[in-house]
Amino acid sequence: RLRPYVALSAVALAFISAPASVAAHERWFVPDDEQTPPDWGDLLSLPVLIAVVASLAVVGALTVAERRLGDPLWPRPAFLQGAEPSAAAILGVQVATTMIFSATRLNLFVPNIDLPENALGIAIAGVMLVAAFSFITGVLARVGAAITVGLVVLGLAFAPWYEVLEQLLFVGIALYLVALGRGVLLGGPRPEGWSLGVVHGLVPHALTILRVTLAISLITLAFTEKLVAVELGEAFLREYPDFNLPKLAGIDWFTDQRFVYAAGIVECVSGAALLSGKLPRVVILALWLPFNAGIVFLPPAELIGHLPVLAIMYVLLVRGPQGIPARGEEAVGASDHKQVTAAQPLIA
């Protein structure tokens, strides 16, 4: 029988080490013949219930903390204010790096969505390269962003719907760049006519779209690679057993299955906290560990594949085109769109 203090130690160690595997995309590193689809019947399981309850508890705690602090954008280190002008450019370049890497491997954004090894696949990869270079140069970046949205939708032809939903963050990035442009590059064509109306309609909501799409991607991954796909997580741990620190420490009770569930709970809570919009800068700072800890233990594809996520986190941290407004300039609990206005210059 497991003694209570041993069980508590195992749980604590698991939740300390779980962040290292939260950002790891199991499907990227598990051989195809070992991958299993999600078991949607597990949506009614105890781990999912724990994930939901934990998410509600964290969101509730963030809500209370935001009210007590009286500042939805706390904390406000001054040095971050000077970092915001480059936010859109960093976002564009980092997502372009991932897209170029994927295109050269005939993948659509991520390693688990394969393009056909024929003229069609090469053509799609070529289109993705065009969009990527528009993000790097800033030339026709809005056109590249529109292409990116189309490519995400096209993914439904090559992968299950849930694997495409996992990549919703690319839609968020594209819509953000449609609204605000790539930045840094001055001059070039500006939106006119109906496209100007689309841009002005998106501008007030650009940060919200970016935050929500990333949150949905995280929550989806928590379920489709962990909470309702525990066999996939176990297969990943067979390839990389060092991620399960409690087991390495000799606590056999904390099996690979329990560790996968713990990682899924942490990832679900992270996504829910981001989705809530409460103290978003605190949430982003807290997410740096989960999205960096495991990178050093995995092949380079892990880092390259996570560049878009890290770029979104950067943009949300420095608050995009207007940076961090002075305290008192917005109401407590103000939504993201208060921080981005149509008065900002529109750069193609």
Image (tube, rainbow, N blue to C red):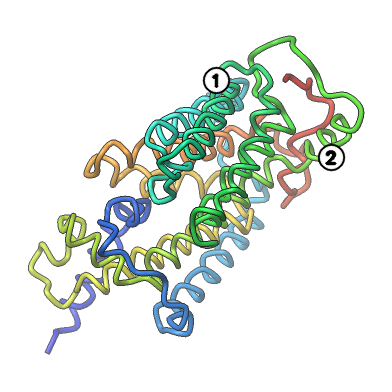
- Three-letter residue code for mark 2: Gly
Tell me where residue 234 sits by quadrant.
bottom left
Farthest residue, direction right: 193
Quarter of the picture containing the C terminus is top right
SS for tag 1? helix
Residue 76, image x and y in percent? 58, 35
Q: Is residue 85 above or below residue 280?
A: above
- The Cα–Cα distance between marks 2 and 1, rounded to whole angstroms, is 25 Å
Task: Say the numbered circle drawn on residue 136.
Answer: 1
Left or right: residue 182 versus residue 266 is right
Left or right: residue 315 versus residue 321 is left
Task: Say the numbered circle drawn on residue 201.
Answer: 2
**In the image, which is nearer the foreground, mark 2 or mark 1?**
1
Task: Say the numbered circle drawn on residue 187.
Answer: none
SS for tag 2? helix
Residue 235, image x and y in percent? 23, 64
Farthest residue, direction bottom: 1
